[in-house]
Image (cartoon, grey):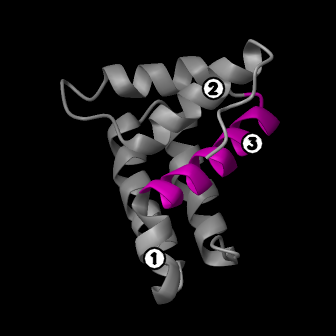
Amino acid sequence: MKLLNEEIERRIDGSIVKFLRRSEYGLATDSILRVVDEIHANIPDSKRVSYGIVYAIRVLSEDLYGRLVQLGVPVFVTASQNAQSQCGCQMPGCLAGVTVISRSRRSGVGPAPF
């Protein structure tokens, strides 16, 4: 099941990654929320209940982690700073996922199977 299409991939690079690299965390968060909704909408109707929004967050988290690592962005620091910048607001699940992936890969232990 391919949930990331070219349009979503362009949006990830053109908004989320760009904003994270510029430390524009509010804009990055807004973009993350929109992209998660787009990914969730790409889940076929027959599978949307069983996969759901958590799966969409996981897909974006893993993809975003790979993109940030490839660009040499300090992933854990970036995700943590974004969380702190939210002024007490709930941290988007995607950046929580990126943080978990980053910590687990730095420690040599992969993320728990989903």
> Which region of the structure is painted magenta?
54-72
Above or below, 50 relative to 36: below
Q: Residues within 10 Å of mark 1 (few under 14, many from 20)?
A: some
Nearer to us of marks 3 and 1 is 1
Furthest residue in direction bottom, as rendered: 45
> Tag 3's secondary structure?
helix
Q: To which residue does mark 3 refer?
A: 66
Question: Residue 13 in the image: x percent, y percent?
Answer: 63, 55
Tell me which amino acid carries mark 1.
Arg
Could you tell whether 36 is left or right of 111 in the image? left
* Tally of numbered tags: 3
C-alpha span from label 3 to label 1: 25 Å
Is residue 32 magenta-colored? no
Q: To which residue does mark 1 refer?
A: 48
Question: Residue 59 in the image: x percent, y percent?
Answer: 61, 56
Question: Residue 47 in the image: x percent, y percent?
Answer: 51, 79
Tell me which amino acid carries mark 3.
Gly
C-alpha span from label 2 to label 3: 9 Å
Residue 75 got which mark?
2
Asked whether 76 or 71 is in front, the reply is: 76
Is any part of residue 48 visible from this angle? yes
What residue appears at the point 43 percent right and 20 percent down from the top-left corner?
Answer: 81
In the rendered structure, are the residues bearing label 3 and label 1 in contact, judged by CB atoms less than 8 Å apart?
A: no
Which one is earlier in the sequence, the residue at label 1 or at label 2? 1
> Tag 1's secondary structure?
helix
